[in-house]
Amino acid sequence: MSREATFIREQFLQNVARHEMTVLRDDGVDRHLCFKQPDSSIYWFDVITWSGRLYIGGDCGTWVFNRLEDMFQFFRSDRGGINPSYWSEKLEATPERGAEEFSEDRFIAVVNEYRLRWVRDAARSGDLTREQRRELWQAVDDEVFRALSYHGEHGAFQAANDFSWKPDLDRNRGRSWCFVDFFDHRFTRYTDRFIWNCYAIVWAIARYDERKALVDSTAMKGSGHA
């Protein structure tokens, strides 16, 4: 689990610390559970399932998943873990911005991987002098990272796409440095809200299972089988 996901999980558990579950429907795979604080609607959410679908909606967006006949079976987790990558593939409906967003940190990391490789390869091969390697490194700052700072995601992608740097042509036979296969990389992260709702689903199912186990235990005692 990433540090980011761990932080969101800790936040989620604080958000729902006083939540209570109300079962509005419980008929096979047809369920409607409501989770909220008794005296507040902050961070409230509903979990609704029917054949092959799970809906979660409330204070942190609306999401609909499609996978198994019983969606609780699909999401149930003994340890409370989540699988955002796989689960996002099962989404049928999301808030307007979806489950992913541009990650500036990922973009910077990928760009730095490229220019570090360029500089190291050029040093080994002797294609560039030390000063030229510095110029190449600085060109990325001046053209790509400056575009990121001033123009955001779209400006940064355009700058990376257009980037082509050459030193003295006589020294290097016309070779240029550019971002080959750059857009094969992933530059997004799952939104905090999506991660929050993934934890909410797993947590809600655990609360539901606890209630079921308690009801079944009580029924067993009442029937004299305990």
Image: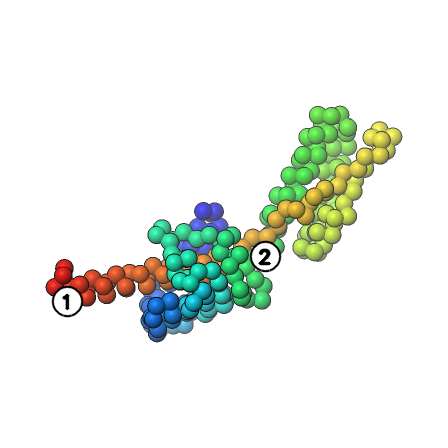
Instruction: Please name the amino acid that badge 2 sits on.
Output: Glu
Which residue is at 14% across, 61% downward? Answer: 225
> Which residue lies at the image location 28% right of the left edge and 60% below the top edge?
210
Q: Nearer the viewer, residue 217 or 114?
A: 217
Which label belongs to residue 101? 2
Residue 7 makes an appearance in the image: no
Q: Name the residue under label 1.
A: 222
Where is 181 relative to 42, above or below? above
Task: Please indicate whether residue 19 sits to the left or right of residue 225 in the image.
Answer: right
**Residue at 57% of width from left, 57% of height from top?**
100
Of residue 122 and residue 94, the one placed in the foreground of this image is 94
Within the image, what quadrant is residue 135 found in?
top right
Q: What residue type is labelled 1?
A: Gly
Locate the C terminus by quadrant: bottom left
Residue 49 spot, x, y in % from top left: 41, 67
What distance separates the C-alpha of mark 2 from that of mark 1? 53 Å
Q: Which of marks 2 and 1 is in front?
A: 1
Secondary structure under badge 2?
strand
Give how far across and how far down residue 167 sits, in percent. 82, 35
The answer to whether 201 is drawn above or below residue 168 in the figure is: below
Neighbour tally class for label 2: few under 14, some 14-19, many 20 plus, Cα within 10 Å? few
Q: Is residue 202 left or right of residue 143?
A: left
Mark 1 lies on a secondary structure that is helix
